Image (tube, grey):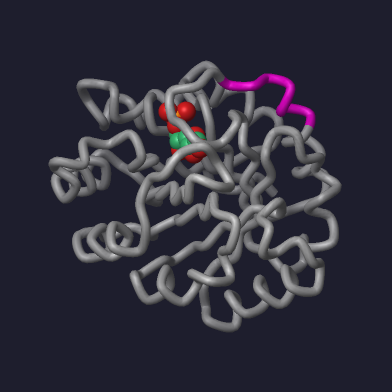
Amino acid sequence: MMRKLLVAPSLLACDFTRLAEEVNAVEQAGADWLHLDVMDGHFVPNISFGPVIVEAVHRVAHRPLDVQLMIEHPEQYVDAFLKAGTDHLTVHVESDGLKSPATLTTFLRDLRRRKIRAGLSVKPKTPAEALRPYLDEIDQILVMTVEPGFGGQAFMPDMLDKIRTCREWFAGDIVIDGGINPQTAALVVEAGANVLVAGTAIFRQPNYHHAIQALRAAA
Ligand code: DX5
């Protein structure tokens, strides 16, 4: 069963001097989810924003907040992000605080108990097999198609096989993040993905509606 194609603008690429306007603009332009990239400067070589910004977006948003924690210790901050209004929480299988399978399983089950969609993400060098033990505990997989940390990077085509493998194993939402544009959107959807995270391909375009439509049309 083909899952619905969804487009999730990544606010990392938005104009933060006009955050509320940018949220309204991409929602009017057809965004399905709002993707928020949280970075701690340790798990990835960049620092972005925390619960304060998630809470600000939650105050003006009408679409689900799809929060990706690119941080070493998600277990220390999960309550703050849920309190801020997170709807979907994606953590990395590589995070230092979740390295124990028992800890990660408990973490994911706790999200679902709290009625939060649970997601698990893998960096480019991490094989899909790292996700296998947790597939029954999650609602979405996020496959990074760039090294996490910065927007505007080039898509990594050798991630396509990983997407295909994930789709063979997992019937839920497969989210792709990194270098997504109309050309790469076609490739990842053909490989089995159904949720497109895009920052540059939307926020660096003059018309957000046309940019989102172009992603949908390409897929
Ligand atoms: C990297 C970030 C970016 C961002 C999307 O850590 O996660 O992938 O969301 O950036 P673009 O769409 O500009 O590649």
From the viewer's perspective, is residue 76 above or below residue 179? below
The quadrant where residue 99 appears: bottom right
User: Residue 208's x, y, as percent?
Assistant: 26, 30
Q: Is residue 70 magenta?
A: no
Give the magenta-colored segment's residue range: 155-161
In this view, the residue in front, 100 or 130, is: 100
User: Residue 83's x, y, as percent?
Assistant: 37, 76
User: Residue 206's x, y, as percent?
Assistant: 21, 21
Q: Is residue 49 visible?
A: yes
From the viewer's perspective, is residue 59 above or below residue 160? below
In this view, the residue in front, 62 or 77, is: 77
The residue at 77%/67% (across/down) is 136
From the viewer's perspective, is residue 193 above or below residue 214? below
User: Residue 134's x, y, as percent?
Assistant: 78, 63
Q: Is 76 on the left or on the right of 20, as rendered?
A: right
The residue at 52%/78% (across/down) is 115
From the viewer's perspective, is residue 148 above or below residue 87? above
In this view, the residue in front, 71 or 163, is: 71
Q: Is residue 197 visible?
A: no
